Image (spheres, rainbow, N blue to C red):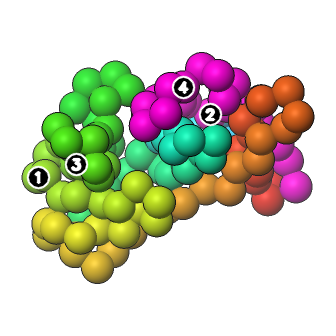
Amino acid sequence: MKKVRLCQLSDLADHQTKGIQVALPDGELDVIVLRLKKQIHAYLNHCPHLGVPLNWQPDVFLSLEETHFQCSTHGALFTLEEGYCIVGPCSGQSLVKLNTEIDDQGAVYLISKQ
């Protein structure tokens, strides 16, 4: 297993998202990081319907109400905790959830099998 540092927990306010490009040996990942209280949720920035990035502009991934991730292309809505699509053409599909870990100093890591 490999750990790749994404950010510090303190870099994100509660309910804030950030897009991070992660370099891995076999390519680059476009990652969405969301802080909900003291938890981090991370997903690939990739709509399961069209394969396009979700964000409207840099670091903006949430619906206007900030209750769901929203695809900028067709408006599909995804739950924050699971990445499950509840509205839109990809209804029933999910964003690809990534494993993360937060160390004692508040550093957030992506946990990769590579």
**Mark 3, mark 4: which one is toward the viewer?**
4
Q: Is residue 21 magenta?
A: yes
Depth check, front residue: 45 or 23: 45
**Mark 2, mark 3: which one is toward the viewer?**
3
Q: Position of residue 103 (x, y in %)?
A: 85, 38
Q: Can residue 11 be seen in this view?
A: yes
In this rendering, is residue 79 above or below 75? below
Query: For the residue labelled by badge 1, is the local secondary structure a helix, a strand or a loop?
Result: loop
Q: Which amino acid does label 1 sit on?
A: His
Q: Name the residue under label 4.
A: 12
In this rendering, is residue 4 above or below 57? below
Do tag 2 and tag 1 residues touch (Cβ < 8 Å)? no
Mark 1 vs mark 3, CA separation in Å: 6 Å
The disc placed on residue 74 is: 1
Do tag 4 and tag 1 residues touch (Cβ < 8 Å)? no
Q: Which amino acid does label 3 sit on?
A: Cys
Mark 3 vs mark 4, CA separation in Å: 21 Å
The disc placed on residue 22 is: 2
Q: Where is residue 12 in the image (x, y as percent from the top left)?
A: 54, 25
Question: Which span is picked out in magenta?
Answer: 1-22
Do tag 1 and tag 3 residues touch (Cβ < 8 Å)? yes
Do tag 2 and tag 3 residues touch (Cβ < 8 Å)? no
Mark 2 vs mark 1, CA separation in Å: 26 Å
Furthest-front residue in this view: 37
Q: Examine the image and state in which quarter residue 7 appears.
A: top right
Q: Residue at x 11, y 52 (%)?
A: 74
Q: Examine the image and state in which quarter residue 95 appears.
A: bottom left
Q: Residue at x 72, y 35 (%)?
A: 108
Q: How crowded is mark 1: few (under 14 residues within 10 Å), some or many (20 or more)?
A: some
Q: What residue type is labelled 2?
A: Val
Q: Which residue is drawn at 47% across and 60% down?
A: 81
Depth check, front residue: 96 or 60: 60
